[in-house]
Image (tube, grey):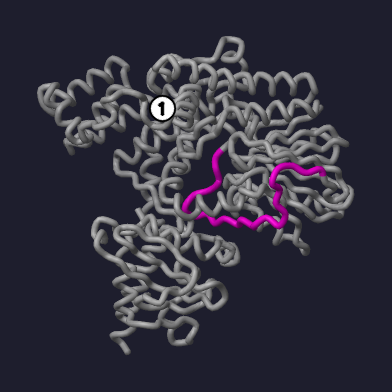
Amino acid sequence: MKQFFVGFAAATITLLVTLGAVGFFWINSSGSDFQRQATEYAAVEKVEVLPDVAEHTKIFEKRFEEPVPGVNVAIGHGLANVVVIDAPDGLIMVDTLESIRAAEALLPWVDQIRARTGKEITDIIYTHNHADHVFGAGVFVNSQSTNPNIWAHDLTQGRVHEVVNVLSPIIFERSMRMFGSYLPDESFSNNGIGPRLLSDDQDGFYFLPPTITIAHSTDVEIAGERVIIRHAPGETPDQLMVYLPERKVLLPADNYYHAFPNLYSIRGTPYRDPRDWVASLDLMRSFNAEVMIPQHSQPIVGADEIDERLRNYRDAIQFVYDATIRMMNQGMSPREIAEQIELPPHLAQTPYLQEFYGRVEWAARSVFTGTLGWFSGDPSELRPVTLRREAELIAELSGGEEALASAAAEAMDRGEYAWALTLGQHLSRLEWQGSDTIRANALRALASQESSSSGRNYFLTSAAEAEGFVLPNTGVANTPSSVINDIPIRNFLAALTVNVRADSLLDTELAYGFDFTDETPITVRIRRGIAFVEDGLSDDRQGTLITTTDVFRGIAIERLSPAKLLVSGEMKLEGSVTTLTEFLAYFEPPI
């Protein structure tokens, strides 16, 4: 029996590590070490912020506004704004912040509105799937006695699950760089569309699934208030805009904010088609709203002012798209286009189109790849030398690694920081001692010149990483088990497929069953280097793990003990522990 539990413990460790690919549920075991790193990094010399970036920070100062009677807005209490509408028969909340921590801090304000009006939240509207709009919902719902309707687009829940599942390792890593989540206050400015993102590896999330979904558009009465909801794809394909006709209030979601739009996000996103974004802005203009309340930045009052801003915003987006296509048709590469494209003066000088968040050149690159794909047309890209070999050849041309390092130092002295970084990257690939210092210095110098918060934060965090700062894995932290149990069980197992050890399994075919007693059983099959999920238990499976879906999730996030579950009978195995261990060993642990 002892050997059984030792063997099963080994299997469980593999299970937990492998299923860590579920993303937001990674277990972070080095929190204290990481906090020590953060403290040490805080002592690094401050990197100055450009004056206009510092000025931009002021629009995100914490405050509460009521631009229209009964329409309450919380600004600066998280990355996004929260809107609470005092409707005749209840409160309508639009978006819910990015984490349990952020939502709990805002809860007293919501309680005050409830006390003042004598109403509870009857409806929540998610404008789209991004974390800063949906991950605080449960905090507000659990603070009252009734459960509200939750409105969202048909695509919203699926996208949330995709991001917290298969893509989470890379999305989390790049998001923490882009949002500067671990930068010390001394070097942090803002996030371009809001203050600091209140979410890191120690924060839980409380996403609640929608109860009412919208495919396209709807005109509906919500809590006694007439509400027009329109599908308005732009920053995301599931974006919803909200219009309150009796109050002439427009909520444009993230299709407008006080900065050049993020037509491409450097944390990584699906293609954001500018043509859809332009069409959505034209749709918003048709309502002739008198007050516009974005989910980021601050309210705008006056029909003429709103129309002018939306017109200029859509014109800037269309200009970038059209100009990029023209240059593409002239045979220019993404890099050549990025070097040349810029907004015309009447748009470039507009305060709400400054590149504090998105950048024109990034948008142009995205249009190119979104329409023609990754290949620029330059044949040298089709079969390039490896990055390591390129570094060796550059060093050889320079007269050796020492000469390459000297060239990087000279580039820094000339103020050519981007070139110094490029040379530093080559030296890093050659594992040359001192390359990390070159890279860190170049990255901080680039950050000091960067107006986009995304770029600045990415540079600074990357500089810290070059010096040994290690980003943590995501953690389950305070996320309630009920939220985790809402994640479809197929997502847990489907995450395995992208982590299969393909190279060692090109001649292997086998299957293992997961018999969930409360849901359709599933088989995970490996076939010559690929893995996939099948419904049902296959006859050729090598073994079966039997339990409920909730128990399985609890094991995957280390809240339940497999050994205790076996003793209690809440989990059983058909076949040996060794078989399960061997099967799970065919999958890579999370990055």
Q: Position of residue 110 (x, y in %)?
A: 75, 50
Q: Tell me: 532 left or right of 273.
A: left
The local secondary structure at tag 1 comes to helix
For the N terminus, the quadrant is bottom left
As rendered, which of 312 and 196 lies closer to the eye? 312
Give the residues in magenta: 196-219
Q: Residue at x 47, y 25 (%)?
A: 49
Up/down of 275 relative to 591, above or below: above
Classify mark 1: residues with Cα within 10 Å, few (<14), some (14-19) or many (20+): many
Q: Main secondary structure of the magenta part?
A: loop
Identity of the residue furthest to the front in this view: 539
Seen as rendered, the residue at the extreme bottom is: 1
What percent of the width, then of the height, locates residue 327? 45, 16
Q: Residue at x 69, y 40 (%)?
A: 240
Q: Which residue is mark 1?
A: 447
Which picture quadrant has residue 582? bottom left
Residue 228 vs 164, above or below: the answer is: above
Q: Amino acid at mark 1?
A: Ala
On the image, the x and y values in percent for residue 249 come to 80, 34
